[in-house]
Image (cartoon, rainbow, N blue to C red):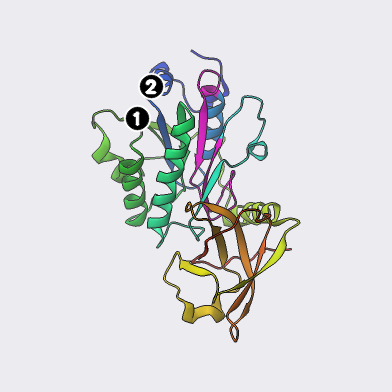
Amino acid sequence: MPVTDLEEFITDQAIFDAVNDRCSRVIMVIGGCDTGKSTLVWRLSHYLARAFVTGIIDADIGQSHIGPPTTVAWGMFKNSFTDWTEMNAEDIYFTGTLSPSGNIFPVLVGSKKMTEQALSRCEKAVVDTTGMIEEPEGRLLKQYKIDLLDPSVVLALERAEELHPILAPFEGREGLSVIRLKVPEKVGRKGSESRTKFRNAQFQRYLSGGKIVDISLDSCAVRFSGHARENTLSCLKGVPVSFRDSRNSDRAIGIIEGVQTNNRRLLIRTGADLHEEYSYIVIGSTKIRIEQ
């Protein structure tokens, strides 16, 4: 049995064999909120990186560790890393939201695109996911994500059998190992206040030292990630935005701090230098309040 801090989650040699199999390129971790998913992803990636070039896809858009919240991001794991803050995003995909609820499409697209990028450069891709598992959206999100990403291994963290409605159709599927893991007793419940505090800290970190970009909607194309339209401009203060280039890649994320409806201009705070030109902006579907 390998000596690793993974043993808090995994004690069966057969599971180590499954994730070590060279054919098991995509390993997905699912579970409800506060079940230890991100901890398992980190420890598993650290373990795999000893033998494989390993990437992490961070699809937990509300509790992002790699990219800023509202994005699906991926990064390459190095054994020298001691925590998430040392991992830079190789690329990000802006979903415009902090929760997949009502916004499943951009979350699925972002997860697919970032996983494909990781697989183009890595031997293993470990996918972290949101804690949304409730009926019906949680079930649909997880099941279609499994269909899209086509993992070889799904590690399912559960306290009882709460993931059964999601996993039952996949058990016995050829080429897929569904492995149920008990949530370790040490894993506590953070609560919504703790999650909000962490999310705000991640936004502040990303936007620190940022600047205001003045955008004219008459000279810049706009895409909306949700149901909003241009006739709702006056309601966009506090909404996140992405600057997307001609390759359909997100170059930077910002938050709308001011709206000038009379001349159709947006004042957007971003923490990134826009060295490369962007083709259009994507306006998100949720408001974000960051405590200063």
The residue lying toward the viewer, choosing from 56 and 38, is 56
Please provide percent x and percent y for residue 83.
65, 35
Picture quadrant where residue 29 is located: top left
Q: Are marks 2 and 1 in contact (CB under 8 Å)?
A: yes
Q: Is residue 231 in view from this perspective? A: yes
User: Can you name the residue that lies furthest to the top here?
Assistant: 1
Identify the secondary structure beneath mark 1.
Answer: loop
- Say which mark, if any, is on residue 46: none
| Amino acid type indicated by mark 1 | Ser
The answer for how far apart the CA atoms under marks 2 and 1 are is: 9 Å
Q: Earlier in the sequence, mark 2 or mark 1?
A: 2
Q: Decide: few, some or many residues near mark 2? Use Cα within 10 Å; few <14, some 14-19, many ≥20.
A: some
Residue 224 is one of the magenta-drawn residues? no
Left or right side of 280 for 78: right
Q: Which residue is mark 1?
A: 152
Q: Is 115 drawn above or below residue 289 in the view shown? A: above
Q: Tell me which corner region of the image, top left, top right, bottom left or bottom right, holds residue 149.
A: top left
SS label for mark 2:
helix
Q: Nearer the viewer, residue 51 or 265?
A: 265
Q: Is residue 77 placed above or below 223 in the rendered structure?
A: above
**In this rendering, would 193 be left or right of 122?**
right
Q: Looking at numbered disc 2 in the image, what kind of residue is underneath it?
A: Ala
Relative image position of residue 39 (x, y in whole percent): 56, 35
Which range of residues does the magenta coloring cover? 47-75
User: Nearer the observer, disc 2 or disc 1?
Assistant: 1
Question: Is residue 63 part of the magenta span, yes or no?
Answer: yes
The picture places residue 58, in percent across and down from the top left corner, at: 51, 43
Residue 108 drawn at (x, y percent): 39, 50
> What residue is shown with label 2?
18
Q: Where on the picture, by quarter, is residue 159?
A: top left
Query: Residue sitting at 48 percent across and 77 percent down?
Result: 230
| Count of numbered tags | 2
